[in-house]
Image: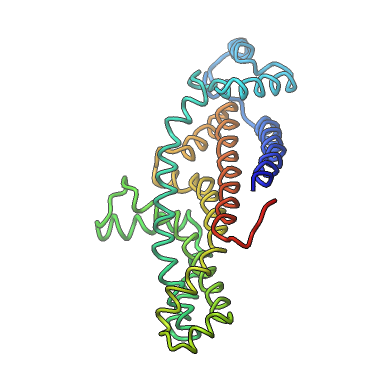
Amino acid sequence: MGMYCIRRVLLAIPVIAGVTILVFFVIHLVPGDPVQMMLGDNASTADIEELRTALGLNDPLPLQFKNFIVSIFDGNLGRSIMTRRPVMESIRERIPSTIMLALGALAVALTIAVPIGTISAWKRNSAIDGISRIISLLGISVPNFWLGPMLIIIFYIKLSLFSISGIMLPAITLGAGMAAITTRMIRSTLIDVMAENYVTTAKSKGLSNAIIMIKHALKNALLPVVTIVGLQFGALLSGAIIVETIFSWPGIGMLTIEAITRRDYPMVQGCILVISCCYVLINLLTDIAYGILDPRIRYD
């Protein structure tokens, strides 16, 4: 297990390095001048060039990249072009809101997926199973940028059940797709588990289907789901960008959109780098958790 963790960390290093290089050079290829946006259309060419030089934007790209790498090891990820604050300081203020939203979406997804997936497998090929599969397919197909406004119209404007500034609507919007994927995964793994020999033995002993499902099948079926949930939770952090924009949720996703709009290169680079590191870390923890939960797996 120890060597496995070390290998995973070593494999994560080139991934983070690749993301760092890609984000830096892609963001500098995007049309638009942050200095022009700061000073406005009436600014003179001399004023624009003076500020670009002061901000280091006239430096050669290799030198700017070197300065960015140095800022990473300094721990501040550079300074925002717009606010002149350390990038990491702004991210630290916003990331708790994103984590709260992702955890809320995870809670919504599991609350929906576990019971529906279990019932769907238990009542396989029934009307309930068919309905749950159709709903799951819709949940996977419906994009967040459409679902969010629909929830606002229905539950805030029409029914006045939820506040638009609360966490419930954005959590449902973000967690709907994950709930659909997890429901299908639980159903599929439960059906496979119910065909195992030990389940047949339990049935021959006269145990009820409910006891077999809850005490035996569900426990083993949830093990593969751990991996899916871990990967999906990492995806929630990146998917939060759209949801946070729709609901004006003050998280790192909203900060990223603001930085992209303003061509704030250091802020965009810092936000994407932090999100990427979180995704890699979650994947690592997911693999370790799966190894702990399933004693058949040995990472030696």
Q: Is residue 159 left or right of residue 218?
A: left
Viewer can see residue 74: yes
Q: How far from the left and from the top, in percent, is residue 169? A: 36, 53
Q: Residue 74, percent across and down? A: 59, 20
* Residue 47 versus residue 110 in the image, above or below: above
The residue sitting at 57% across, 61% down in the picture is: 294
Q: Residue at x 55, y 34 (%)?
A: 271
Q: Position of residue 36 (x, y in %)?
A: 57, 22
Towards the viewer: 167 or 219: 219
Left or right, 67 with respect to 77, comes to right
Q: Tell me the residue at 45%/75% (across/down).
A: 132
Up-down: is 130 above or below 71? Answer: below
Quadrant of the rendered image containing residue 245 = top left
Q: Would you say residue 40 is visible in this rendering?
A: no
Question: How does the figure colour the protein chain or chains?
Answer: rainbow
State the residue in front, 18 or 253.
18
Depth order, front residue of 36/69: 69
| Quarter holding residue 292 | bottom right
Mark count: 0
